[in-house]
Image (tube, coloured by chain):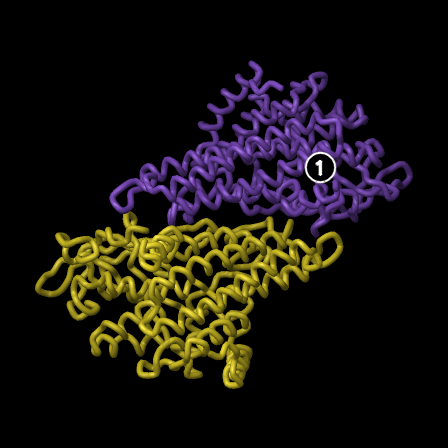
Amino acid sequence: MDLNLTQEDIAFREEVRQFVATALPQDIKDKVFKHQRLENTDYIRWHHALDDHGWGAPSWPVEFGGTGWTALQKLIFEIETFKGGAPRLLPFGLSMIGPVLMKYASPEMQQRFLPRMLRIEDWWCQGYSEPGSGSDLASLKTRAEKTPEGYVVNGQKTWTTLGQYADWMFCLVRTDPDAKPQRGISMLLIDMRQPGVTVRPIKTLDGGHDVNEVWLEDVKVPYENLVGNENEGWTYAKYLLGHERTGIAGIGLCYRELQILKDLAAEVQWNGKPANQDSRLKDKISLIEADIIALEMMLLRIASDSTQGPGPQASVLKIRGSEVQQDLAKLQLEVMGLNGWPYSPSWLEAGSDVFGPGHGFAAAASANYFDMRKTTIYGGTTEVQKSIIAKQILDV
Amino acid sequence: MDFAYSQEQQMLTESLSRVVKEDWSFEKRRKRQEQAELDSAAWNTLAELGVLGLSVPAEYDGFGESAASLLAIHQELGRGLVSEPVVPSAVMGARILAGSDNEALKQDYLGKLASGETIFSLAYEEGQRNDNLADISTQVQNQDGKLVLSGQKQAVWHAGAANVFIVSALLNGELALLLVPSDTDGIVVQDFPSMDGTRCGNIVFNQVNLDATALLASGQQALDLLNQGLDDGIVALCAHAAGAMDALLGITVEYLKTRQQFGKPLAQFQVLQHRLADMYVQKEVALSMAYVAAAAVGEADQAKKRRMLSSAKVKVAMAGRLIGESAVQLHGGMGMTHELEVGDYFKRLTFIDYLLGDTTYHLKQLEALE
């Protein structure tokens, strides 16, 4: 056991820092630090910059065009890119359907889709939740009927993040209505640019539009777009969720938001002194930082322990990461005081001229607090994660 | 002690409850919120019900009711998320003006305040956090028998809707309170929507010329009056919050009874039942603290009074956060949408933490008592 960074690790960290400092466009960085909304093209520009440097798939093995980094290198990469103001990597291809295809799909399907994920040549979205199937995902009702030409899909998906830009959806459908709920599910790759697919926005608490409803009406899907085997989709779905939950832990995001919190606390005045001189506030910031340090080591331990991809321990990471993100947003708003009051959704795009210190951050502080409530809901609620821990880890 | 509503309180509460259900329905509320201007019809409805004259003494055409009436009325307003400027005008404005010795201003304005014709707002905070109400930069100077006001106030609750500001400023190094009509030359109001949609504003006073008669109070009397206004505001706000919590809990219980997962209503899952029970317990804490705040207004021991009011504000804010956050969590993804009113309640309960001194501010007040 060696619990400290090696010289190579430190050099790698420096390399990532340098790369972000030179390759990340300033306008994207500004938006990220002000919590302003990113355009789809902003994400794509960042992915292209990474791929140009050979880092298009930081979490993938070399054989699929990835970097082949160790768990520690991946972690260093995530933390340093976030701290430097980079957007999150779009998870839908690289860390959701990508790993599923590597493990379960035919070589033809891998060849067809995986290489295009590095430069977001296809924008992917997730077709999991339905209006009647949230926590009880296995009750999903979207049907795929077999015809001589292929599957015909009918149903409705919801909470489809950034689905408004999507070219492809990885979609859970019911192919055997008579089997037990988990046994009759298959995973299909659905071309979103075809008749019968309708995407409608869902407006969220912060007034923004990230999530969508997707209607699928007589949508045709060729048999070659079936992932793995028919009726085994639940296995793939769970494998994907393990990756999603590990990603939601958001260690890089936590470090970035901690930095924003500290910057705000240094700038905002409390009783004529910088807020960070208030001992109660210092305590609160210290406790959150301690949470993040614990989360980081937890991620490394669990990653080093699971060569087969994340198991039920991903639930531990998801619970802790989501709670820390919520605490950070709450404390940022608290530090802002009166400057955190003003809010209009349009300011997330255009910024605001309504007063306040915090590099224009003021206009987004409350929106971010409201929006972060989603982290204990999406990717499986905290309640669902606790049931997984009780049943699958503690065996009760 | 007597916890029963008087006959008048009972009647007013009942009619208010009916009107709020009808006129502050989800659709009507949302529509109003999209406009920057105050809906005068809604405002007149509140005036006609007597809500705006509640704290105005009877000799000035009000009802001269005590803080206990605020408790009854503002719970109903909170249940319906009534966001019109009742607290800044009819509670804080009325209290400060009624408590001043400036008889001419009282004659001129109290009746109009009670009828809703004139809307008051209290401009006392200045940007960065400060725990001392008298440690401000806004200045008023006596020049040839005239008062000249200069400075900036920030995040003034309903500044845009107000016709009259009560402004705190330093006069010869001492705190003073002034009554300033909003259309006086030299005033610029920057109106903005705040985190729950309530309109607030930043105000610049640039060499604003006022008659010497604009002075409401100065020195210790000004500080006492300002505190009395804020204290009454805290009573109303705590009651408002308790009413909103009660309504939100009811909405959440109904949702969990209806929403099915794993073949049964969510309400049948024990872990969710316990969360609802936690919300109920905190709602009871908040309601009790609203009573504490109302009782504090009549408390003679100043230290005890401050402890009661600041304790109430802190606990109500914490209960509001827990109930708001839990309601969103229990609604799942639906709780995150703009489609349901859950979010409206959550945002209001969050904003209440920041109005009239946030938790950090009130903990400092309590610290100072020791």
Figure quadrant of the C terminus of chain B? top right
Q: Residue at 72% across / 44% down in the picture?
A: B367
Q: Kindly identify the amino acid type of the residue bearing the numbered disc 1.
A: Phe
Q: Residue most toward the left?
A: A148
Residue receiving disc 1: B165
Q: Is residue A211 left or right of residue B43?
A: left
Residue B361: x and y in percent read 68, 45
Query: Is residue A320 positioned above or below A115 on the image?
Result: above
Q: Residue at 36% across / 70% down in the picture?
A: A95
Q: Residue most toward the right?
A: B144
- Provide the letter of the chain coloured yellow: A
| Residue A382 appearing in the image | yes
Residue B259: x and y in percent read 31, 41
> What SS does tag 1 mark?
strand
Q: Residue at 31% across / 38% down in the picture?
A: B258
- Provide the letter of the chain coloured purple: B
Using the rendered view, name the quadrant where residue A189 is placed: bottom left
Residue under mark 1: which chain is it in? B
Which sits in the foreground, B285 or B137? B285
Query: Is residue A140 positioned above or below B145 on the image?
Result: below
Which sits in the foreground, B179 or A239? A239
Residue B42: x and y in percent read 53, 30
Which sits in the foreground, A83 or B36? A83
Is disc 1 surrounded by few (<14), some (14 to 19) or many (20+) residues within 10 Å?
A: many
Figure quadrant of the N terminus of chain B? top right
Query: Is residue A197 positioned above or below B171 on the image?
Result: below
Q: Residue at 63% across / 54% down in the picture?
A: A335
Residue B275: x and y in percent read 43, 42
| Residue B40 appearing in the image | no
Q: Residue most toward the top?
A: B7
Q: Is residue A50 left or right of residue A221?
A: right
